[in-house]
Image (cartoon, rainbow, N blue to C red):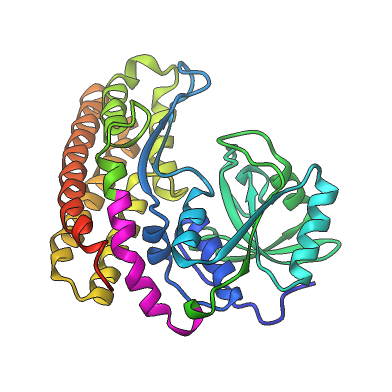
């Protein structure tokens, strides 16, 4: 079956695209950037490589998979349901039942098994929105980068959903929106205005905390130190370093994409709340996004450059980004702490 009234909603990041499609089908239209901001999605995480000599750590510019959806739905008052099936057959049955009940289904998948993905790497923390399923074909929505609405063989979906390889797998995980609070659909703008500053406050508090060497600003500085030595520590540095740059740019895990989304969230917040105190932060995250793009350009140009000098330049750029993000979040925390307790 295929949801008759479904209209694909496009986006640039997999989980927020999936969440936007689930919410739209449930009856409310909220931008991807707003969902990212309400979901407190921005972060930096450093996850050690399984084989440090042959691979790089997973460096990602967002919080853990599914946590963003939980945060955003909690802010909106939407009832998000998560279910995990024990095997492929029961997962297919569960998905069909949810579709039959009118839900768009968020599915955690490994991109290696998706026919339309060019990457041949396992990455299992990817999300797609499932809106149709029959004996042979599955109809899904992925990011704009991956072509938006796609039709794939059911067997590809089964393998992608069942995979336990790659980064943070969640085999047979489904997400869906059970119901929305009536006011969210009838007075969306008021609900968003009531939640914006609290989401900013919670994000700024987290980003200014010392959460150890794996998370936040401190993790960014650790990554800078590690990257500066990759030409000596990686056995296939020419290929691996450039691949990190490509992955950050095109697979969406790098800082630039998420800083762009957070800038767009702050810009929309400025428009909805009419608060000019957000203006310097909108500009500041635009500057940070450009610095992330510059770091990615340097990584992708690594094979044809003075290698050690190039990685030292990337490291210096990451340190500068860490300084800028720390200052931005420390600055944001001051008005957010005050506004979060005020009536919208």
Q: Is residue 60 left or right of residue 260?
A: right
Q: Position of residue 117 (x, y in %)?
A: 59, 50
* Residue plotted at (83% across, 50% down): 90
Q: Is residue 191 magenta?
A: yes
Q: Nearer the viewer, residue 123 or 237?
A: 123
The rendered magenta stretch, by its main secondary structure, is classed as helix
> In the figure, residue 278 lies in which quadrant?
bottom left
Query: Where does the magenta region start and end?
Result: 185-203
Q: Is residue 81 magenta?
A: no
In the depicted structure, whether residue 280 falls above or below residue 173? below
In the depicted structure, whether residue 184 falls above or below residue 241? below
Q: Is residue 298 left or right of residue 17?
A: left
* Residue plotted at (24% across, 40% down): 208
Q: Position of residue 221 (x, y in %)?
A: 25, 29
Tell me if residue 64 can be seen: yes
Q: Position of residue 243 (x, y in %)?
A: 43, 36
* Residue plotted at (19% across, 54% down): 332
Q: Quadrant of the N terminus?
A: bottom right
* Residue plotted at (36% across, 78% down): 190
Tell me if residue 297 can be seen: no
């Amino acid at each position: 079956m295929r949801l008759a009234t479904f209209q694909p909603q496009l986006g640039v990041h997999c989980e927020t695209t999936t969440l936007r499609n689930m919410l739209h089908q449930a009856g409310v239209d909220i931008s991807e950037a707003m969902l990212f901001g309400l979901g407190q999605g921005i972060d930096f995480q450093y996850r050690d490589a399984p084989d440090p000599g042959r691979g790089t750590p997973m460096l990602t510019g967002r919080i853990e998979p599914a946590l963003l959806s939980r945060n955003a739905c909690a802010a909106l008052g939407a009832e998000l349901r998560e279910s995990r099936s024990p095997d492929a057959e029961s997962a297919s049955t569960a998905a069909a039942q949810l579709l039959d009940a009118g839900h768009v289904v968020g599915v955690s998948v490994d991109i290696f098994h998706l026919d339309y993905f060019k990457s041949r790497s396992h990455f299992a923390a990817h999300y797609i929105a499932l809106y149709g399923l029959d004996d042979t074909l599955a109809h899904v929505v992925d990011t704009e980068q991956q072509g938006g609405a796609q039709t794939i063989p059911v067997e590809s979906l089964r393998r992608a959903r069942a995979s336990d390889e790659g980064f943070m797998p969640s085999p047979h995980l489904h997400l869906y929106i059970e119901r929305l609070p009536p006011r969210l659909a009838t007075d969306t703008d008021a609900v968003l205005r009531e939640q914006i500053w609290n989401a900013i406050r919670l994000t700024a508090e987290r980003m200014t905390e010392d959460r150890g060497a794996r998370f936040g600003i401190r993790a960014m500085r650790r990554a800078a130190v590690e990257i500066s030595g990759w030409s000596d520590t990686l056995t296939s540095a020419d290929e691996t370093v450039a691949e990190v740059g490509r992955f950050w740019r095109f697979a969406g895990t790098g800082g630039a994409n998420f800083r762009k989304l957070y800038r767009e969230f702050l810009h929309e917040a400025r428009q909805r709340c009419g608060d000019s105190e957000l203006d310097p932060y909108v500009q500041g995250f635009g500057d940070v996004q450009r610095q992330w793009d510059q770091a990615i350009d340097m990584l992708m140009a690594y094979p044809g450059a003075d290698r050690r000098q190039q990685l030292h330049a990337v490291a210096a750029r990451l340190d500068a980004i860490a300084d800028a993000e720390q200052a931005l979040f420390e600055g944001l925390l001051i008005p957010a702490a005050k506004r979060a307790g005020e009536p919208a």
